[in-house]
Image (cartoon, rainbow, N blue to C red):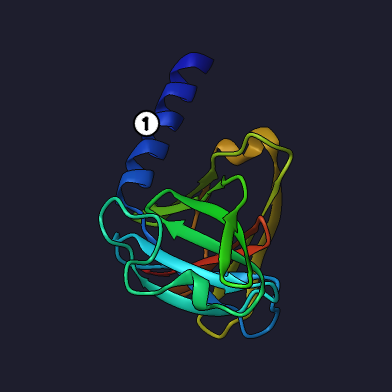
Amino acid sequence: MKTIKNLQLVTWMLIALHVSGFNVIQNEFDSHESKIELGNNDPMLVIKNDRGEIIYRAPAAAGLEEPSDFDLRTLPDGKYVMELESNVEIKVRPFQVQTGYVSFEKASKIFKPVVNSRDQLVYVSKLAFDNSRLKVEIYDKYHDLVFSEILKNKEMNGRIYDFSGLRGDHFEVVVRTDGRVYNQILEF
């Protein structure tokens, strides 16, 4: 029985991953957190300086992991991060510019959380290979906190929230993890 439930969970997660997409927008409240809103499925390329400020953002050309219309060598000396964002993950590639020379460091991946809804059931999950935490917050249309929970490790495999008992038809699900904020507006 447990195997069947795990298989169902994985199936839902794969379906949700397939239909999800996020855009990165700098959070105006905390320069160390990026706010990511559900959006189109087009890959985006973002370059941030060492303060986390976005200095370049454009749709990523197919197969390219560096901007084709922006010369990295022209950046002021310093440390930067290039992020290639797809539907399910963000490839993070730090680099440094020194007197016109660009040196790249080892790339890493951040897997995005998935927020998916069907009727008044909302599914939240995140693929995690480390000990990261996932904070889920649900707000009503007046921006009042309705529910809050912190998920750890195995709990991040998926959680289903039933909105049928909540008053209202407009909610925002906010997920915080990996120094980023992901949100999705839900209307039932």
Q: Is residue 172 visible?
A: no
- Residue drawn at the location 35% of the way across and 68% of the way down: 39
**Horizontal side of residue 18 vs 185, given as left or right:** left
- Residue drawn at the location 70% of the way across and 79% of the way down: 30
Quadrant for residue 57, please give it: bottom left
Question: In what quadrant of the picture does the C terminus appear?
Answer: bottom left
Work out whether 94 lies above or below 129.
Answer: below
Query: 187 or 34: nearer the eye?
Result: 34
Q: Secondary structure at mark 1?
A: helix
Disc 1 marks a residue whose amino acid type is: Thr
Q: Mark 1 = which residue?
A: 11
Label 1 environment density (alpha carbons within 10 Å; few <14, some 14–19, many ≥20): few
State the image coordinates of residue 180 (x, y, percent, origin top left). Answer: 62, 64
**Horizontal side of residue 83 vs 131, given as left or right:** left
Q: Is residue 74 visible?
A: yes
| Label total for image | 1
Quadrant for residue 109, please give it: top right
Query: 1 or 76: nearer the eye?
Result: 76
